Image (cartoon, rainbow, N blue to C red):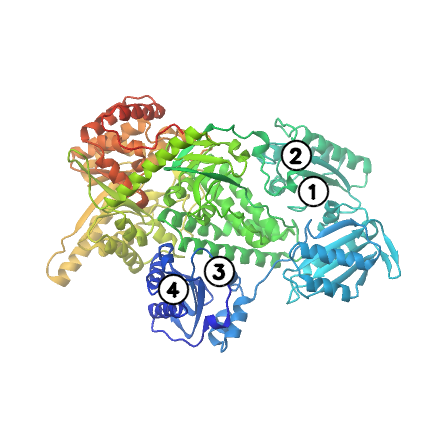
Amino acid sequence: MLSLAHEDVLLAAHANDWRDALNQAADALVAGGRATPAYREGLLAREAQSSTYLGQGIAIPHGTPDSREAVLATGVRVLQFPQGVEWHDGNRVFLVVTIAAQSDEHLDILRSLTRVLDREGVSERLASATTAEQILAELGREVIPPRLDADTVLCGFPARDRDELVLAGAARLRQAGCVGDGFLTAMLQTEPNALGQGIWLVQSRQDVSQPALSVVTPEKALDTRHGRINAVACLALDADGGQHRVLLERLLTLLEDGAGERLPGLSISALLARLLGESSTAQLASVTLLNAHGLHARPAKQLVQAARDAGESFGIIPSLRLEQGEGGIVSAASLTKVLGLGARRGQTLVFSANGEDARANQAALDAMVAAVKAGLGESVEPLMDQRPEASAPDAQPASDKVAAPEADSVVPAVAASPGMAIAPCWVMYQPRFLYEARSDAGAEHEAQRLASGIQTAREQLQELVNRAEGAEMAEILSMHEEMLGDPELFAAARESLEEGHSAEAAWWSAIDSAARAQENLADRLLAERAADLRDVGRRVLGVLTDTPLPSAPETPHVLVTEDIGPSDVARLDTSRVRGLVTALGGATSHSAILARSLGIPAVVGAGPSVLAIADGSELIVDGERGRVSVMPSASRRARAEEAIAGHEQRQAAAWETRMAPAITRDGHQVEVVANLGNTAHAGDAVERGAEGVGLLRTEFVFMAHPQAPDLATQTAQYGEALDALDGRPLVARTLDVGGDKPLPYWPLPREDNPFLGLRGIRLALTRPEVLETQVRALLMAAGSRPIRLMFPMVKDLAELRAARAIVERVRSELDAAHEAEHGQPLVRDVQVGVMIEIPSAALTAASIAPEVDFFSVGTNDLTQYTLAIDRGHATLSAQADGLHPAVLRLIEMTVAAAHAHGAWVGVCGELASDDQAVGVLVGLGVDELSVSSRQIPLVKARVRELDLTMAREQARVALAQPTSEDVRSALDSLIEQNAQPHPRQEEQV
């Protein structure tokens, strides 16, 4: 773990500008033996991707993954600029913390720095500091949340006197990692204070790493010379004396309830319940949850109805908690609160009733237990092992219901990212977050905690964006960062805070309610947003509860998990993760898209059985055909190894020839270009052989700013890509946002189905001044260089004409101004086109084609619109295949219409890099294939293996099939019959 020392701090530096400051930072790393001079380019490249300004006058420049070769030893240098330096994003920087890291060690410092940002006056103190000690003290102040859970509580300890209880409580805190040996010594030297009711308190700040409370009860009450002892509480105080107050309030809860005399004999669960506020007089009933997927919406609704029925029948509505205390105590009649518990199969539910009529209480509890045992409207099966899953932190409900696949079996899945991998598996489960449901600290205090947690999570996401390997990953993580800024989420959480809930409980209730509401709308993009919402929600919970993330093995492995969020993918160590398998998800889910961007072989939607596979079991992941081989036989493994070797040879050969054009064996050329979501990645695309950019997603220029970027900002951004392309064409899709990709400064009315609502060109035409500024910036940045303007979500000719009129007017104004200034017209290379992603546009392509220069087919959306299949649907997504003959027919119509009027056609969806589809698309007459940068060399190589006659035959055969499955089967047969088959990974593995 990285740490800062006095020698790492350089005071009173001066810089003329941010580049000068960055050069000084690089020099400091070189002088300290941490990096070679080449690391300077990595620092500059990172700033080109995104500003490393963190906040409060602090910037954290660090290199890109490609620059790690220039790191000699991991280290940090801190440079103070008392006068400040204006960073390239307009912020003023007083402290530069520059990092040379060989892996992800710098995240430890980043986590520490993010806690600095919430304190007032930090930038001023950093600027005015005169010693290294002052700066280190400011950066090192860390707020650690207090701890009280099942690991800090001990019940029924066989103690003979008070000192033994004190020592047991202190030892409990040491075992939990909250204190050191010095705390134990201090406990024995400190006289406990009597709080009343036989409860004693002893506290110390000595050797405390985390404020915490341990409560220890004896087997039975002790009568000693000190007085009666029912419990001893050991309190580990934090340094500033503030974080432990909430723990003291928990003790006061016991006293106010008069529970002291009844503490001996309580279980850990019951004692935690008292500390959380459950009345000691409440009647309790416990039952094990057997539902395969826990308390999800349907059984939770049944449980809530049972609680309401109990209220009507017996006059008492029971409360509900989990035995281990996660989630606190909630009303069993509140659907939102019950869902918020996140109860899983095997966990023990504890119902409580505290009415005046004991018989009515018991009747209500019996009704709740009976409802749960009956399955809450679902068929349930008993546990194989009666131990509750709550005691196993890695437990998952799915593996209880489905057995692991047999050895040498093949599990079908959805192909998500091409390639093949062989490695032992590691099954990763989501971390469990333990927190109190309610807080006595007050709504304002909890709101501040929540705001601080959200800010820290946003900074973490920005760091992931900065080091993201690929445009797709940066885009999705940027979207996650925007989600955290959603005021409606915070407002929903604030309502729960006002009701007395903790920041954690309020936040997750808001996240879960919003996610479930979106899932119920049955819209693909909203379904994806629901998964993304939970991903960002878990990130904030992790910050609030200081919950560590799952730790992956140090050795190469295949990652197996129920589902994986974008931030999980961003943390993957691609040097160790050989493949990815998820139980849920579709080929166009964000996890699949990100796996493709990283070049990791992946399959998704493999079903729950993969979660039951034992860690270390060898798997073969075939991301080309969508299958997982479990514990393969020697012969199956040998075939897979041979296929991998052939693929690696093909990749190596493709890389060597990546700069050559993609020309078929009989001389037909197809342009292969890049899909980009960030202008900073254009240079990388060219290095990988891109002949241009076929899709620049310009909306992420807008998403990167708190307000609409002005003309100068946009011109500079687009110019960066055009400079890197060095005369190669750039196809820029105009702003494509809407309800599915909202901008914080462009509020939109709520829509039941935003993907079919106001978005793309429809939305842009409601604010023509925004579209006009973007068109002006693109034309100004291009000058005489080739620029292609493409309008998204065009349904017919009328929308094209409205958008094109803006282009023609802006171009006329710019040309007139140029001629007036230079005395001659500027020769521009401008083309205008539309995306074909709505079936109506393909069906009317003949009427649109005379007024465009090109079409670009977005096969992802065209497929889902044509087949009426949500491509993020857990069970249907595999059927959303772009090789469906209906989709191919629309592409054929589009190409025919375009070529009849002298226009060209590109394909910019996932189908363009599908190995089986390349020949079909070439045979249909597609002129350009736009793919992710990593796929460019292989797609070029695939084109070179074809001849036009072969490709046209593949297209003819594909169009004649009734289903996408038949298309793929027929193409396999056709390729096998070909006299010169190209190397493929299609062994039966």
Q: Please, what secondary structure does the residue beneath circle 2 have?
A: loop
- Residue 348's tag is none
Mark 4 or 3 closer to N-term? Answer: 4
Query: In this orientation, which residue lies closer to the viewer: 671 or 852?
Result: 671
Asked if residue 837 can be seen in this view, the reply is no
- Identify the residue under disc 2: 289
Q: Please, what secondary structure does the residue beneath circle 4 have?
A: loop
Q: Nearer the viewer, mark 2 or mark 3?
A: 3
10 Å neighbourhood of mark 2: few (<14), some, or many (≥20)?
A: many
- Identify the residue under disc 4: 35
Q: Are marks 3 and 1 in contact (CB under 8 Å)?
A: no
Circle 3: residue type = Leu
Location of residue 332 (image quadrant) = top right
- Identify the residue under disc 1: 323
- Identify the residue under disc 3: 110
Q: CA distance from mark 2 to mark 3?
A: 40 Å
Percent x, y of residue 289: 66, 34
Location of residue 78 (image quadrant) = bottom left
Query: In this orientation, which residue lies closer to the viewer: 702 or 411?
Result: 411
Q: CA distance from mark 3 to mark 1?
A: 36 Å
Percent x, y of residue 874: 47, 33
Q: Residue at x 32, y 25 (%)?
A: 967
Circle 1: residue type = Glu
Q: Please, what secondary structure does the residue beneath circle 1 have?
A: loop
